[in-house]
Amino acid sequence: MQVGGDAVTGPLPGRHSPVRPIWLCRVDANPWPCGEAKLALLARYDGDRPGLLALLASLSAEATEHLTQLDNGRRIDLTDRFLAWVRPADH
């Protein structure tokens, strides 16, 4: 199983990176991005919400592909898990 970043996204911040293809945190085994990963991503992309959303959209697509394959082709919607928690800085 692959851990951490890849050629497209590079290394993800902090120790709380995903174990691919199951997309669980390698530290706490929670669905990735876990709470600690979210905090690390917010810190890394401070002032660059569009960049953070672009990264998360890419990772969401990758995770959807992996998890769909693991679940016998049943499509999984990961929008809330990957994108809904990112709020504009003024909210």
Image (tube, rainbow, N blue to C red):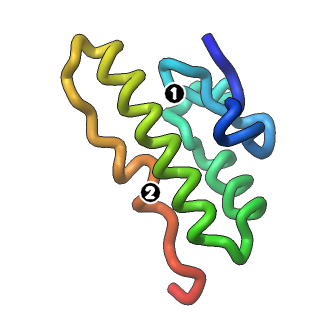
At 60% across and 61% down in the image, what residue appears? 52
User: Most extreme residue toward the front, as rendered?
Assistant: 7
At 53% across and 51% down in the image, what residue appears? 56
Instruction: Name the residue nearer the viewer: 66 or 16.
Output: 66
> In the drawing, does residue 82 fall left or right of residue 28?
left
Amino acid beneath label 1: Trp
Element at label 1? loop
At 30% across and 23% down in the image, what residue appears? 68
Residue 8, relative to residue 55: is it above or below?
A: above
Image mark for residue 23: 1
> In the drawing, does residue 24 fall left or right of residue 3?
left
| Residue 2, picture quadrant | top right
First in sequence: mark 2 or mark 1? 1
| Residue 65, picture quadrant | top left
- Residue 73 percent location from the top left of the image: 22, 17
Residue 26, relative to residue 36: is it above or below?
A: above
Residue 22, relative to residue 10: is it above or below?
A: above
Query: How crowded is the residue under tag 1: few (<14 C-alpha within 10 Å), some, or many (20+)?
Result: many
Instruction: Name the residue nearer the viewer: 37 or 47.
Output: 47
At 65% across and 38% down in the image, what residue appears? 8
Q: Report the quarter where the N terminus lies.
A: top right
Query: How crowded is the residue under tag 2: few (<14 C-alpha within 10 Å), some, or many (20+)?
Result: some
Identify residue for label 2.
83
- Residue 24 percent location from the top left of the image: 54, 27
Element at label 2? helix
- Residue 39 percent location from the top left of the image: 69, 57
- Residue 16 percent location from the top left of the image: 71, 36
> In the drawing, does residue 55 fall left or right of residue 68?
right
Gap in angstroms between the C-alphas marked 2 and 1: 15 Å
Proximity of marks 2 and 1: CB atoms separated by less than 8 Å: no
| Residue 66, picture quadrant | top left
User: Most extreme residue toward the left, as rendered?
Assistant: 74
